[in-house]
Amino acid sequence: MTEDEARQVELVRAIELEDRDGLLFTREDRDQADARARVAVGGGTGRRADARFVAARADFATTRIATRHPGIAGLLEKGRWTRWLAILLPLVALAAGLLANEFGTAKRLDLLAVPLLGTIAWNLLVYLWLAGTALTGRGHVSAVPLADLAGRANHAGRREFEAGTPIDRAALAFRRRWAALTAPLASARTARTLHLGAALFAAGLIAGIYGRALVTEYRAGWESTFLSAPAVHALLSTVLGPASALTGVAIPGVPGIEAMRWTGPQAGALGGGVNAGPWIHLYTVTMAALVIVPRLALTAWQGARALRLARTLPVAGRDNFYVRRLLRASGGRAGAVRVTPYAAKPGEETRRRLASALRAALGDSAEVRFDEDVAYGAEDGWLAAHPPAPDDDYHVLLFTLAATPEAENHGALARQIADALRRDHPGTVLAAIIDESGYRAHFAGQAGLEERVAQRLAAWRAVLGEAGVTPLGIDLSDSPDGDLAQKIERGLLPDAEMRR
Amino acid sequence: MTLEAPAATGTTVNLSLVSHTNVGKTTLTRTLLGRDVGEVRDAAHVTDLSTGYVLVQAGEDTLMLWDTPGFGDTARLLSRLRQSGNPIGWFLTQVWDRWRERPLWSSQQAVKNVREEADVILYLVNAAEDPAAAGYVGLEMEVLGWIGKPVVVLLNQMGPPRGDVSNEIARWSDIGTSGQVRAVLPLDAFARVWVQEGALLDAVAPLLPPEKQPAMAGLRARWEELNRTRFDQSMAVLARYLAAAAKDRETVDEPGWQGKVAAAVTGTSRGDRAARKSMQALGGRLAEATATSTDELIRLHNLSGKAARTVLERVSDDYAHAEKTPEGAAAVLGGMASGAVGGLAADLAAGGLTLGGGMIVGAVLGALGATGIAKGINLARGEDGSSVRWSEDFMERLAATALLRYLAVAHYGRGRGEWSEGEHPPHWPPVVEAEIARHKSALTAARKARDGEAAELYTTVMRDSGTAVLAALYPDARPAIDSARKPAGSTISSLP
């Protein structure tokens, strides 16, 4: 999926999740989008076809929504600032490099000048830091705030939609999710820009010196308050030594260095120093080897990485409820629900009603499987004997409201399954239904029944809440199927991500 | 374990209420004691210590009721107990943390109490649950089996009182090993009545060790005396109330010559207004008496809270029929009384009079049918003017509502403290009506009796019909009811 496609998919997803009532993207729109996408995919199957379906549907959807809400188009544009920065920053660096020596003394090539030695030192430091972060594996962290800043700059001062409306919430959710999704990509792009900038700055520095050296005679020399000629010699031999060995341009001995002092006994009429030609060559070679070439290599690497990341954005996939629902609509695999009754013996009629309600909520071809009833106290070891299936969309625990929830039993089962799912099948949503039918029938006509039901449900919420499950209390005996399905849809099946 | 009162030096019969957590032991204890003890909440492991309460005292003998913490985490506990050669002995020597291992701590407290104190185990179950699904029941019966004391199963959380509970009893009677459960009795903490408690004592008595049985007989007799006295006093309250209503009269002011002129000129009758005023006074007094007598019943049954209104509303609901149309009825009647009675019924139905008492009066009037308003109130023209009084039909209905009020109060459990909820099942009114109809002639006689005798006659009628109603509602508890037929002994003057 390309970056543009991914952006569309995520935006449509955000809108559909927020727009539960179908005000922005109506039921008809959804049906049309499904149909259009089905045609576009042409009956293929597998991961690629799934992705194509989702992308084609999102393309149709965004076009449709953008015709009604022009602000949507703005959300789909790539960040302008990001692109400008990617071009501008290296250019600024080049210009800075070209001009850098102008800030020094005229006609002088200061051997110890900050632009030259400082650039080299700074780059060496950067390499060290890169190596360090590569080893500890914390490289991207620093780039995220930068990407965030760029993202915020992109949208600064622009509030397209009225606050609090579904579309505004969707835009906000989209931006947040998109920023998180593209954080590695943004980090790679930022790194690419910065590396290129560093290479161009060094190139500019050298080019500036050469350019000026053509028309003026540069004198090379040095001065220092603290350093003596031997120290300077040692320093220059270390920094420029490899280049000297490579080019054959010799570095003068300590007396030669001493003679190059701007001020002092040997400083002649020319104001000290020697012709800078050999030194310029030496610095050029050093700069190219230590800064320009490595930085360009890093630029290329980060550029390649950005390209790869852009093509493989981790967009919501099969593990996402929203996508699974779309794919079910596309005529792909139907949803699968596993129901595990615990310390409850649902009758045939109850099972039938629950199954048909689940099908109504998930699509007619959804597969609903009932486990054997788990006996009270049998939760230990049950999971090992009945491991979660990878293809389940939902694992529904079925309890009865007549029972008092106990953390050591009902709670333990929910916790164990929740942990297993989180570890092995994060795509499966764990849910709990508390069947009120028996309890309500038993206490029918008794005063304060609703209060008692509410109280008992609160106890269930408290116990199951520790496993991260919000139980849904429904009466499986007397609600009509459609009603039941709606309640389940609303209470039990919202996208797990939406609940966060 | 704490003892609420020092044990008598005589024999102490100990009944231990045991169950899985949150089945309602403390709630039932409160109901049986008529006092708010312990803590009650819909959650697991609310009670964490066994506490003994004196249920009845006869001379030096005491009947103690023990409220214990509930069993919890039963399955895990059982799998550990089964590995031990001496499960109970092993379990009692373990040290559990009261807070971190609350289920095990609570289970241990319960087992300890049962082993050390209980003569008979009252195993309470949550009748709302399916015994097949409530897996802990079998496990806990196994634990109780190791202790080896007789078990009586009490069905709590029965829901509203029902006519026939044999299905429920059958559902729960085959738990545990065969013969382990000696009796299954419905005893809902929210909707039991004293005759059911008597049945429980009768079921427990033969299960006691022989040396305690004589003491139990004395305790049983004393318990009966106390409850019979309460029943008689309740009936006396209602009899006084009925007698007062029967002899209540309100004179209607005759319109003077000005009224007659005004009536001739305007066409409206001042007599109408006068009659209405009188009826309203009559209705107001009855409404107030209804509320007061309900309060008295509530006090007799140790229920706190001034919730008479709840009872009254519930009782009047049974009589408030959809076809209750006072205005329509008034149209049928015409003449002086019609407007006045119609207005009165409307006032009463709207609850415009004292508390909920007015609603009962209104509901009874409505229940008399289309012409019921006219039937409800008699207008008597005497030599010294006219007066209004309650009709015979009305008095008969009033007696029925009075019995229903008694049932509502007597069944009320005090689980959650303040008197706020209640049960009023649909099978009560027909039973009550039938009994009242059977005593119709006695009621008529009481209504016509002279002032001094009326209360006495009403007392007899109410006691007879009340006993018959309880017998019809709880056929299994007949022994306790039969003893109630005899009037209480004169030695007992009041309740403790």
Image: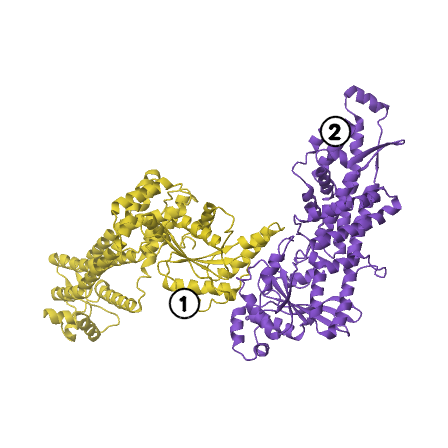
Q: Quadrant of the C terminus of chain A?
A: bottom left
The crowd level at tag 2 (other Cα within 10 Å; few <14, some 14-19, many 20+) is some
> Looking at the image, which residue sits at the far bottom?
B85
Name the element at disc 2.
helix
Query: In this view of the protein, which residue sits in the foreground, B50 or A465?
Result: B50
Measured from the top left, where is residue A269 in percent x and y? 14, 65
Q: Colour of chain B?
A: purple
- Residue A269 visible to an observer of this rendering: no
- Residue B219 visible to an observer of this rendering: yes
Q: Is residue B380 above or below residue A232?
A: above
Q: CA distance from mark 2 to mark 1?
A: 79 Å
Query: Which chain contains the residue that carries disc 2?
Result: B
Report the residue marked by disc 1.
A385
The crowd level at tag 1 (other Cα within 10 Å; few <14, some 14-19, many 20+) is few
Measured from the top left, where is residue B298 in percent x and y? 74, 53
Measured from the top left, where is residue B364 in percent x and y? 73, 40
Label at residue B333: 2
Residue B437 is left or right of residue A179, and the answer is: right
Residue drawn at 81 percent across, 44 percent down: B441
- The amino acid at mark 2 is Leu
Name the element at disc 1.
helix
Query: In this view of the protein, which residue sits in the foreground, A87 or B271?
Result: B271
Residue drawn at 51 percent across, 71 percent down: B76
User: Do the residues at pointers 2 and 1 share their chain?
Assistant: no
- The amino acid at mark 1 is Ala
